[in-house]
């Protein structure tokens, strides 16, 4: 199957108002037997999913703008990936890479190093998730530099394990009740052009003010830069609201970290693998980090994560770090096929082209007043945020409206979730047909319009 395949559905089909009877029954059992620590935007109970089409247990068919949370960049059950996985399943399913060797893990490491957004030699460490990749990056950063402080950003989301959640700062509930967290982590504001924490008038000014804050207030008053091991940053904030930093920011941050021998760790867990129109989002600013954290889309839904770092920083000695399942051979086979598919189908170019169309349409709806709740439209490739506000001047977040809009879209057969406080997040599989995508965008605009007129 390729993205050029025709006769794929371009509209959803709802046969029973969701949640239908089978879904409701499952929701009850879920409530009874699962810890309810998740936030579910709406009661979708998945029965099967192919490419960008999701079916629920009551026979409804949906158009997916979530990619199972930015994982299914190559679509669900991508035949190319499934074929590779089946082959590997018949060979062996596990043989702990921490103690032994196998070839596909080396082949994938070679591939990851070759596509990593930095020049020179690199090395890989495999994990099973985004949070574990962040844990590994924290350990490598401290171990390599012999320094203990780490700088992260307000609004960041890096995962839920104790190290990762200590860097996470997008919603208080994510940290509430878990302290003491990992010490020596300092959070600074993220350059959020639409709501610059320093009140800057232009995005560039906002970028400069954040750099100035780190230099003057953090390094000048709080901690000597020689004690800082790393800066961890999402090149585009995901959970925090699909926030794109100003163009001057990443180069300035790289310069600042280089000046002080501080490692730059980019968390590409959500932005990686062509989501933003480049293999890795940091490439938009031609900045070369020291470590890249990966997971989500790397293996099209099979559990795998990785960090790819410059060879000289990946220097933990034998026995210092490992994971039994990290680099599971089935997940690795899926990752190799995923990356091959992405390259073969030129999904980066596709994400850029489709993303530009989507952004243009949302901007038009904002600028013409067609959908008055839209306060800001931003993004790269198919990682697009549409921030909703009740008032363009006060920028009061349209929180409740967002929840209503997403629920209405769900009932119509469009799977969309939010990010940050009141941002619609558009992140479909990169394989989605243009027609299905633009129909979904029109549905989103219609629902925003409807909510605006209330
Ligand atoms: C940028 C980023 N980093 C890390 C994570 C954590 O990944 P996981 O849920 O696989 O632990 C996420 C998950 O949403 C993420 O968006």
Image (cartoon, grey):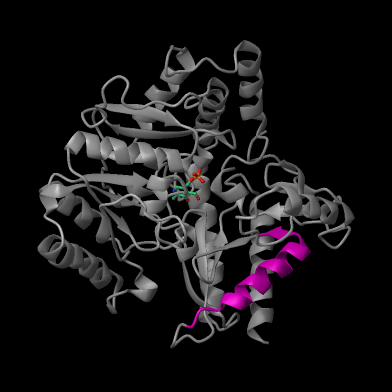
Measuring from the top left, give residue 275's x and y in whole percent: 49, 48
Q: Is residue 320 above or below residue 356?
A: above
Foreground of the two, 203 or 417: 417
User: Is residue 226 found left or right of 122 in the rendered image?
Assistant: left
Q: Is residue 104 magenta?
A: no
Residue 84 visible somewhere in the drawing: yes
Q: Quadrant of residue 417?
A: bottom right
Measuring from the top left, give residue 238's x and y in whole percent: 46, 57
Residue depicted at 67% across the width and 30% down the height = 79
User: Is residue 439 found left or right of 393 in the rendered image?
Assistant: right
Q: Is residue 202 above or below residue 245?
A: below
Foreground of the two, 235 or 2: 235
Q: Main secondary structure of the magenta part?
A: helix
Residue 9 visible somewhere in the drawing: no
Residue depicted at 49% across the width and 66% down the height = 420
Measuring from the top left, give residue 19's x and y in whole percent: 81, 59
Q: Is residue 402 above or below residue 265?
A: below
- The N terminus, quarter of image: top right
Count the marks: 0
Measuring from the top left, give residue 305's x and y in whole percent: 46, 35
Foreground of the two, 357 or 406: 406
Residue depicted at 59% across the width and 43% down the height = 72
Foreground of the two, 283 or 123: 123
Residue depicted at 33% across the width and 49% down the height = 182
User: Is residue 130 found left or right of 93 in the rendered image?
Assistant: left
- The C terminus, quarter of image: bottom right
Which span is picked out in magenta?
A: 396-415
């Amino acid at each position: 199957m390729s993205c050029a395949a025709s006769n794929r559905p371009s509209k959803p089909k709802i046969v029973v108002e969701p949640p239908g009877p089978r879904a409701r029954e499952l929701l009850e059992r879920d409530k009874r037997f699962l810890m309810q620590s998740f936030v579910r935007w709406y009661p979708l109970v998945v029965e099967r999913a192919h490419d960008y089409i999701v079916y629920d247990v009551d026979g409804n068919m949906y158009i997916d703008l979530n990619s199972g949370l930015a994982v299914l960049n190559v679509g669900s059950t991508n035949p190319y990936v499934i074929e590779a996985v089946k082959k590997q399943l018949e060979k062996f399913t596990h043989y702990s890479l921490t103690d032994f060797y196998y070839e596909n893990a080396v082949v994938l490491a070679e591939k990851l190093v070759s596509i990593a957004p930095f020049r020179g030699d690199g090395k890989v460490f495999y994990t099973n998730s985004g949070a574990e990749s962040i844990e590994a990056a924290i350990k490598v950063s401290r171990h390599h530099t012999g320094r203990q402080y780490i700088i992260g950003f307000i609004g960041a989301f890096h995962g839920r394990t104790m190290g990762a959640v200590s860097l996470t700062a997008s919603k208080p509930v994510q940290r509430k009740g878990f302290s003491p967290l990992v010490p020596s982590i300092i959070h600074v504001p993220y350059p959020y052009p639409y709501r610059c924490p320093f009140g800057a008038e232009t995005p560039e000014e906002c970028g400069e003010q954040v750099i100035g804050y780190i230099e003057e207030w953090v390094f000048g008053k709080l901690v000597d830069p020689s004690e800082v091991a790393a800066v961890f940053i999402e090149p585009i904030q995901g959970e925090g609201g699909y926030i794109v930093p100003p163009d001057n920011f990443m180069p300035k941050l790289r310069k600042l970290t280089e000046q002080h021998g501080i490692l730059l760790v980019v968390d590409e867990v959500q932005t990686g693998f062509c989501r933003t129109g480049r293999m890795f989002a940091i490439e938009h600013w031609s900045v070369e980090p020291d470590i890249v954290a990966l997971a989500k889309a790397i293996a099209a839904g099979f559990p795998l994560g990785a960090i790819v770092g410059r060879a000289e920083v990946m220097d933990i000695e034998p026995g210092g770090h490992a994971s039994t399942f990290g680099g599971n051979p089935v997940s690795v086979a899926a990752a190799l096929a995923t990356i091959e598919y992405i390259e073969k189908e030129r999904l980066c170019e596709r994400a850029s082209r489709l993303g530009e169309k989507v952004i243009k349409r949302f901007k038009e709806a904002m600028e013409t007043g067609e959908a008055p709740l839209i306060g800001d439209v931003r993004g790269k490739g198919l990682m697009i945020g549409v921030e909703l506000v009740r008032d363009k001047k006060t920028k009061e977040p349209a929180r409740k409206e967002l929840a209503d809009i997403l629920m209405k879209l769900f009932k119509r057969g469009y799977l969309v979730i939010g990010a940050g406080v009141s941002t619609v997040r558009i992140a479909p599989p990169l394989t989605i047909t243009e027609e299905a995508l633009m129909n979904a965008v029109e549905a989103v605009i219609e629902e925003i319009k409807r909510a605006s007129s209330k």
